[in-house]
Image (cartoon, rainbow, N blue to C red):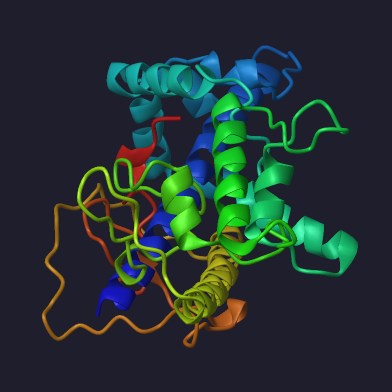
Amino acid sequence: MKRRKWRKRVFNKAATKVVRDSFSNARIQAIVNFHKRVKNLNVKKTPDLKKMHLEAEEYVQGEIDWIMKDPEAWRWICNHWAGSDFQGASDRNRGNRTSKPGMQRFGADGFIGKEQCMEAKTGVKPSFVEVYIEGHKGSDPDNPEVLCDEQATEKLAKYKENVIQRHGPEFDWRAAALDVEAIYEAGGGLRHGRWGLGDGALEYDRIPRPQRTSQGSSSRRPSRAQQEAQQEETRRLQEETRKLRENNDYMMTFLMKLGGDVPEFRPPQPYQQVPPNYFIGNPMTQRPPLGDAPSFDLHLTTTALLPAKDHHVEMLGVLGLLTG
């Protein structure tokens, strides 16, 4: 049951991000379209363009084809973008993201895309640590462990030190599976419920926390057999995570291919309780082909994908999440 909840949480988080990013990109494209069609100006998509806000009618003139299939939906989202609540949240969140420049360099593809690019180049699936280093790569190629962010460099150094201390100086800490206790110590425990390294690759409820003795005494060290069992468990969880990432890629492709019959617009719906007998299947084993994918509703306050009774995708069920 815990594993099922974890899978559902990861899937819903990934699906929400895909939809949120789709609408964020649509707002930027609407700004470009407005300047090109109305003002006859060519505006490039740069990071500074996110700082620009238009009036509702100006957004309306920068039509986005896949939303314009429902004019009422398009006008609703334009009013939402032009509202003071959205603009305030957008500016605030952007300021938070830029307060630490160089925090990561995964780019638009994120961790999953970086991992796939590395595998395509070498033909070998990289470890989590190798992807982490590549995604936080610093400016000095001769010192790859000096990352672009001071905090990330410090965590990586602590993790390396803990792993070598536990497994010996000859241990290949970069290519090996994540060491749970070394991660726990390197990240200073579970701060705010998150792992310092490997958050999202480790299942919270199934990973044993390091057992600590009374204050002033050292932690109990597991036996080699326990360490090997723990490493095997971590490898299994990473394989499950890989499958979830593949499903996330499928979800992204599916949403990008939406363009057929778009339903009549309905404003965001209130919370709907999931029926007690509703069964949410394993998305890894019930993946439909793209051409015959079932429809579903994405709701703001639900934590599951509810079946659509009238067989359509509710476009604006997630608009309240769009703040970037």
Q: Residue at x 74, y 21 (%)?
A: 44
In the image, is residue 294 above or below residue 19? below
Q: Residue at x 88, y 60 (%)?
A: 121
- From the viewer's side, name the closer residue of 166 and 199: 166
Q: Is residue 199 visible?
A: no
- Describe residue 168's horizontal placement relative to residue 27 as left or right: right
- From the viewer's side, name the closer residue of 191 and 93: 191
Where is residue 14? Give x, y as percent.
46, 57
Q: Residue at x 57, y 37 (%)?
A: 25
Where is residue 52? Give x, y as percent.
53, 14
Where is residue 211? Give x, y as percent.
29, 61
- Describe residue 147's horizontal placement relative to residue 261 as left or right: right
- Describe residue 242's horizontal placement relative to residue 215 as left or right: right
- Can you tell which quarter of the image residue 142 is in? top right
Where is residue 49? Give x, y as percent.
61, 18
- From the viewer's side, name the closer residue of 241 and 38: 241
